[in-house]
Amino acid sequence: MPVLDDVQAMYNADTKGMLKALWELPEQCARAWELGMAADVSPMDDLRQVVVTGLGGSAIGGDLLRVYAAQRLDVPVVVNRDYVLPEFVGPHTLVFAVSYSGNTEETLSAYAQAREKGASLVVLTTGGKLGEMARNDGVPVITVPGGIAPRSATGYLFIPTLAVLYRMGLLPDLSHEVAECVSLLQSMREELKPEVPRDSNQAKMLAASFHNRIPVIWGSSGTTEVVAQRWKGQINENAKAPACWNVFPELNHNELVGFEFPGELLRRLYVVILRDPRDHPRVQKRFAITREIMEGAVAGVVEIMARGSGALARMYSLVYIGDYASVYLAMLYGVDPGPVRVIDTLKARLAEE
Ligand code: F6R
């Protein structure tokens, strides 16, 4: 597959600079922490829930927060990908309204509802209508740099929420975790960048395994679950290709049964098991047994272990590999990873209604 080793051709095909944004992700994470630390927020009395409302690339950061906070925060984090907020939202709820463009109609609707319900709000955006509304309403706005795709801004759209929760006295100071994450990603990009040839580039090898197959990405509840979802979304949006995701242990109770028919199509699946040293010990035992059961039916199975010691570094180490792999898969399909015409068309059509 010479296409993956023609570095200049890849940069030329990438008209929106997805590879550049990936290269800059470590610095984005560092900057994102600073932006969150500078936000104009104050502690809340009797906080009972945190809600992150957003869609697509602006929502996945909410899920990263949900998983990250599950063992650290004594209130639940709920992610809302809809026009409508859950009934429980009220004066004891902190709502992060997240939209990179600031113009996503579902998020604008949820923002208005959060205001009506008397929730405390923090907005993360580059501007748009959401930025304007928030400024007029006196709602704190974390303005993140524009010019990249929302899905490339996962640092900007997630890490400031950690800083805000720290500043509100709800999470410890995570600056060391952020620093570890930044330096791990800085070293990983030297392994994953386009200049590293396919035979020694894990992301390129993955893309080659996914090519002309359907990737099936499995994570585990409480550790890598969101990363599996992220891989799926990135393969969809960057490579314009389908992918599936699921989580252990739940998939052992249904999905695993479905590896018998139709044999011909199953041989087109390529399975990735995302692993984390903190996966539940019983779940770790499930990986090998699961492989024994289904491996013969599919094109291949590979396990990828998270790197780093803090949860942030471990999550992002896997996100990074998947992000690069999805861009390389786009190259193999001969498609520009940046534009998402289908989403743009949908939004434009809806704006006419
Ligand atoms: C595009 C992308 C999309 C958008 C989504 C919401 O890169 O990832 O999933 O994130 O359409 O738009 P924003 O983020 O502007 O609210």
Image (cartoon, grey):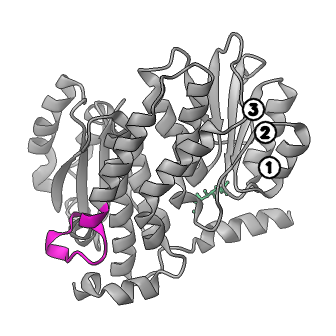
Mark 1 surroundings within 10 Å by alpha-carbon count, few (fewer than 14), some (14 through 19), many (20 or more): many
Q: From this viewpoint, which residue is outermost toward the top?
A: 46
Of 172 and 293, nearer the camera is 172
Residue 179 colored in magenta in the image: no
**Which quadrant of the figure shows ligand 1?**
bottom right
CA–CA distance in space, label 1 to label 3: 12 Å
Does the residue at mark 3 contact the one at mark 2 (Cβ under 8 Å)? Answer: yes
Give residue 305's quadrant in the image.
top left
Is 45 situated left or right of 333 in this image? Answer: right
- Asked if the residue under mark 3 is in contact with the one under mark 1, i.e. CB atoms within 8 Å, the reply is no
Read off the residue under disc 1: 130
The amino acid marked with disc number 3 is Leu
The amino acid beneath tag 2 is: Tyr
Q: Does residue 151 sit above or below 174 in this rendering?
A: below
Q: CA distance from mark 1 to mark 2?
A: 8 Å
Viewer-nearest of labels 1 and 2? Answer: 1
Report which residue position mark 2 lands on: 111
Q: Quadrant of residue 221?
A: top left
Residue identified by numbered label 3 = 121
Residue 299 appears at what percent x and percent y?
17, 62
Q: Is residue 350 left or right of residue 298?
A: right
Say whether disc 1 or disc 3 marks the residue closer to the N-terminus.
Answer: 3
Confirm or deny contact between disc 1 and disc 2 (CB under 8 A): yes
Q: Secondary structure at mark 1?
A: helix
Q: Which residues are magenta?
A: 189-202
Q: Residue at x 33, y 50 (%)?
A: 183
In this picture, is 160 found above or below 15? above
